[in-house]
Image (spheres, rainbow, N blue to C red):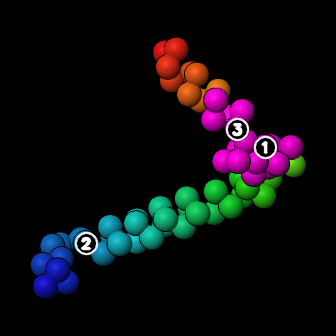
Amino acid sequence: MFRDLLGLVDGISGYRILALLLFFSTFILIAVRALLMDKQERERMKRLPLDPESHQSQHGELSSG
């Protein structure tokens, strides 16, 4: 059904290509950023969900604002 509807729109193939390029460029940028990240920053982010101090500081910032 949707394929038939989208087939009626002129120039829809350009949006498909644009969406695909946007997805892959975002994925590649995130992967490059992760690979180039400092080891200290990577370790800090790895511990972040389990670190009780980070949860306290987040709650303190929210309540004091």
> Looking at the rendered structure, which numbered label has been put on residue 8?
none
Secondary element type, mark 2: helix
> Looking at the rendered structure, which numbered label has been put on residue 52?
3
Query: Residue 33 vs residue 8: left or right?
Result: right
Mark 2: few/some/many CA within 10 Å (<14, 14-19, 20+):
few
> Looking at the rendered structure, which numbered label has been put on residue 12?
2
Secondary element type, mark 1: helix
**What amino acid type is highlighted by mark number 1?**
Arg
The residue identified by callout 1 is 44
Which residue is depicted at the point 63% across and 56% down?
29
Which residue is depicted at the point 78% across and 43% down?
44
- Marks 3 and 2 sit apart, C-alpha to C-alpha, by 49 Å
Query: Residue 8 vs residue 18: left or right?
Result: left
Q: Marks 3 and 2: CB-CB under 8 Å?
A: no
Q: Is residue 24 above or below residue 48?
A: below
**What amino acid type is highlighted by mark number 2?**
Ile
Q: Is residue 37 visible?
A: no
- Marks 3 and 1 sit apart, C-alpha to C-alpha, by 13 Å
Q: Is residue 62 visible?
A: yes
Choose between 46 and 1: the one closer to the eye: 46
Which residue is depicted at the point 24% across and 71% down?
11
Disc nearer the start of the sequence (2/1):
2
